[in-house]
Amino acid sequence: MNGQNKRARKGTLAGPAAPLDRVLALASPYNSSLLLLIVFFLVTMVGLFVIRDLHATNVEAQKMYAGSVQGLQRIGELQYEVQETRRSTFYALTTNDSNLQLEYADQSREADRLVNEGISEYLRQARMPHEIEVGRRLQLDWSGYLGVRNEVLASILEGSTKEAVNLDLKGGVPSFERVRQDLQEIKRLYDEQASQQLANVAATSRRTIFRLIGVLGITLALASASVWAIQRSKMLGAIQLAKLQMEFVASVSHELRTPLAVISSAADNIADGLVGGKDQLKRYGSAIQNQCRQITELVNQILLFASTKEGKNRYTLRPLQVSRIIDAVLDNTAELVQEIGFVIERRIESGLPCVMGDLSALSQCLQNLIVNAVKYSGESRWIGIRAFVHDSEERSCKEIRITVQDRGMGIDRLEMPHIFEPFYRGAAVMAAQIHGTGLGLSLAKSIAEAMGGTLSVVSELAVGSIFTLHLPIVEKQESEMASVTSKPDPSIRT
Amino acid sequence: MRRIAGLLFILASAAFSIAALSLESAPNASSLPEPQIASEQNLAVVVNLSNPVQNLSMPELRRIFLGERSHWPNGRRITLVMMEPGQPERAVVLRDICQMNETDFNNHFLHGVFTGEVLVSPKTLATPVGVRKFVFNVPGAIGYLRVLDLDPSVKAIRIDERGPEDKGYRLHVPPRSSK
């Protein structure tokens, strides 16, 4: 059986994807979440890079606008005001009306005030030595031109038009040309800056596009891998389930065949008249009775498991005394235990508080644990049952713990995560040809969780196992009520 | 006779009443301010800030305002600025500096330009603001402004060692009408 199982498992995992399948099988119920988490993490990481790039592009564009574009705009305005200063001075030449000439002089002075403000602003924002140098040169050249402009204005107002024109030609034109060249130089600097920043923006944009393509590619690849892995995992799960179900059917058939063979043989003997005497007949009847009980228990387990899976079980929770539960379980298993000569060491703390639960279900749960202990104890033939109060770290409150300990074969570390899975049977168990359905622990765990508790296990190969049922403690008042109304419950006999 | 005496009495009473009333309504002579002219009503003669001249005598000022002097000591050409005819400031300058009326002043310049005796022909501006701006813009300009119209863009010179705020300053202009 074990060899077949191994062969079947090897057959399932054969092929080039076998190592990956092993990984997927190990990660089994979590693989899809794990893969999605990895995808999410990777995409988030690359996405953060893309966001950083976009931010850098944005900052670069803003810097370009604040620096070069606005600078060019300011230089444009400055050029206009410089021209306006000169233009207004010339307008004054076109009239003999002193009042009008004064108005033009005012306009020229207003424009020159704006130019001075613009130059000061430029110098305030200039950072590079060359920018500062050009700015200072412009300031100097502009002052030189204004000196000539003032003389020209004075001449115009005095009425000496010819002198004004001569002054302008001699001093105004060259100084104004210098100012114009300075402004061109500043404009060229801004142009260079803008070109540089534009190149930076373009480079950052290109990088962002590449990264975006990368993100999309990675996302697509990982998503495809995830889908493939999930499908593969589901397929493996389905194969595993089918295998388990086949094993279950085989196991149940085997479990049924033995008592049925006994019953059939006994019935044949009685029918053939081979059984003589009242005592012999009684012995045959007792054997048939025992085998029927085994079959009934087996069928009950299967039905209970089916109803648990379908969620049909309705438990009646009420406060129960721990000693009463354990007594009921020991009563139920007394015959089995005594038959094979097991010793049960029972240690129950005195004055234990009540637990909330369904007596029948809890009895079934503990009974499964005891039956398992009997099955897997080997030659030790010893079972320890303890009940005590413990401070639960997880729940940060006190809880009742009922442990069922054996000194049997123990459980392999690798099999520990799977022992509570339905139909699961360990390799060592199969090798030892210990019969079972693989439902006992699964049922016990389901019941423990339905009672608001948990089921845990500590085990070591060739040393033994300790299964612990953790149950929440009932409030004091309810506990007192339970102790008053406590009486034997017929339902505990399952 | 009695009638005459009665008439005289009535006249005397009436005269007394009128005298009493006039004394009552008139301000107390002892409380009157000194018959001083407020400095705001003085007329300042102004030049460009770059002009080194600080003081001029009245005869020098007269020569300048009559166009008989062409240059300042620093070599700058003198440009005379006058306000339009009819302005009280112009009237004060004509009366107190040029000692001419409008017609004589105009004739003087017409004749002077024709004969070449007058070297500077005055510029005429409409408002005190225009005068101030002109003097500010032209280094050799000279004009006049009420003390109220002065600002730091021009310089007021002293006349016969008296500034426009000094006692005994000679150029006074009537207050502007309040309309």
Image (cartoon, coloured by chain):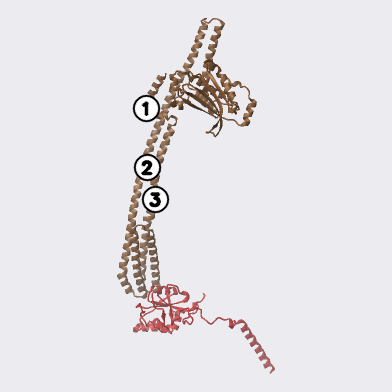
Chain colours: A brown, B red
**In this figure, which residue is indicated by the disc labeled 3?**
A59
Q: Residues within 10 Å of mark 1 (few under 14, many from 20)?
A: some
Q: Amino acid at mark 3?
A: Val
Q: Earlier in the sequence, mark 1 or mark 2?
A: 1
Q: Residues within 10 Å of mark 2 (few under 14, many from 20)?
A: some
1 vs 2, front mark: 1
Quadrant, the N terminus of chain A? top left
Q: Is residue A76 left or right of residue B172?
A: left
Few, some or many C-alpha atoms within 10 Å of disc 3 (few <14, some 14-19, many ≥20)?
A: few
Secondary structure beneath disc 2? helix
Labelled pair 3, 1 in contact (Cβ < 8 Å): no
Which residue type does callout 2 highlight? Leu
Chain for disc number 1: A
Reading the chain from its start, which is encountered first: label 3 or label 2?
Answer: 3
Q: For the residue labelled by badge 1, is the local secondary structure a helix, a strand or a loop? A: helix
**Amino acid marked by disc 1:** Ala
Q: Chain of mark 3?
A: A
Mark 1 sits on what residue?
Answer: A18
Q: Which residue is mark 2?
A: A212
Residue A265 on image: x %, y %: 49, 9
Marks 1 and 2 sit apart, C-alpha to C-alpha, by: 34 Å
